[in-house]
Image (cartoon, grey):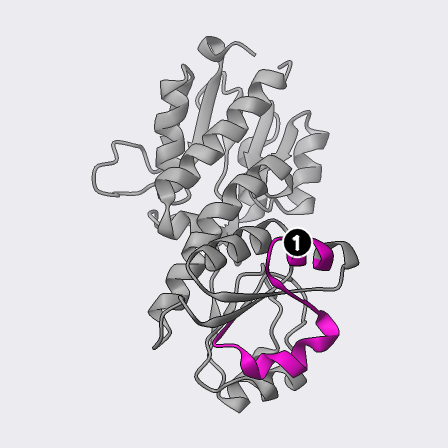
Amino acid sequence: MNRKNAKILLIGGDLRQLTAADELKRLGYTVSVCGFGTYAGAEYKDGIHLPDGTDAVLLPVPVFRGEYMNLPFSEERVTPERLSGILRGHTRLVCGGMIPAELSGELEKSGAAVYDLCESDGFNIMNAVPTAEGAAAVAMDNMKITLAGCSAAVIGFGRVGKALCRLLSAMGAHVTAVSRSERDLAGSEACGYIPADHSALPGIAGEQDVIFNTVPHTVVTEEVLAAMKKDAPLIDLASRPGGVDTMVASRLGIRVISALSLPGKVAPVTAGKIIAKCLDKRLREAVL
């Protein structure tokens, strides 16, 4: 697709979207923005509407927070049904994060291509670095000791887990990488981390000054929580419902910090440029 001929509409979201808008304009696209209410410095209209000839729509990451669309700067309450009605038949590509399956299906039936950023390897790999940096910042805000010299366990050795282990190790932490995968355990050991199988978690939890979880299902069970130090923060980076038994953690007095969407909170400019880069690549590959 020729950038000069493509019209993109960005609907709501956080500061990442505004950065993405600026970056897409810089690349040569015609960009409109709505859904930012009276946000200071934003000259954008608040009402959700599609200009004629819109080729692509960029939705927030994630698209929804609970029942309504993720519009933190707007007072509008947009349901999935309303958003579907606005988009169906009026654009050829819809991009966003964690697009509900029902909405995605309705849009595809209307002839639109759907590109979910959260299912893109490129997006997730690039976001791993700001996520890891944000996680380290959360830890430092909630610890009474430095990360340098501390014992830190990272549960899960995927994209975020690897980036976080690398960062923590560079900061001087003694890093234990926890995984069920024999390949990941071998890889973590080759990188200089302490490898530990999931089954060993209850035995090593009490040695950790901070624990990070990246696995999106319950892996931090009552047995693990009971073994933890009471003053060791437990930082859950996994998407909802997370990987921690929060009811048990509350009963045992363990601090669980749910740290979601960190790129948008700690590095919105970097995260916005990542969104723009991924959408630009998708548009250039598309024949719209």
Residue 74: x %, y % from top left: 34, 47
Say if the magenta span includes residue 186. yes
Q: Residue furthest right?
A: 182
Give percent across and percent down for residue 253.
48, 88
Q: Is residue 53 left or right of residue 12?
A: right
> Which residue is at the front of the view, 29 or 81?
29
Q: Look at the picture and state if 112 lies above or below 234.
A: above
94 versus 66 height, above or below? above
Q: For the view shown, which residue lies furthest in the left direction?
A: 41
Residue 38 position by quadrant: top left
Please state, as top left, top right, bottom left or bottom right, where the C terminus lies in the image.
top right
- Residue 49 is at least partly visible in this image: no
| Image position of 205 with respect to 176: above or below | below
Q: Residue at x 63, y 75 (%)?
A: 220
Q: Which quadrant of the rendered structure holds the N terminus? A: top right
Crowd rating for badge 1 (residues with CA inside 10 Å; few <14, some 14–19, many 20+): few
Pick the front one: 17 or 278: 278
Q: Does residue 22 appear left or right of residue 116 in this picture?
A: left
Give the image location of residue 157, x and y in percent.
Answer: 64, 56
Q: Quadrant of residue 32?
A: top left
Instruction: Identify the secondary structure beneath mark 1.
Output: helix
Q: Amino acid at mark 1?
A: Ala
Q: Please give the name of the residue rendered at 58% of the width and 61% of the height, measured from the top-left corner.
A: 238
Name which residue lies at 49% across and 58% down: 169
Residue 147 on image: x %, y %:
40, 67
**How many marks do you count on the picture?**
1
Residue position marked by numbered label 1 in the rendering: 190
The magenta-colored residue range is 185-211
Task: Say whether residue 89 is magenta.
Answer: no
Image position of 271 (left or right of 219): left
Q: Residue at x 50, y 85 (%)?
A: 229
Q: Is residue 254 visible?
A: yes
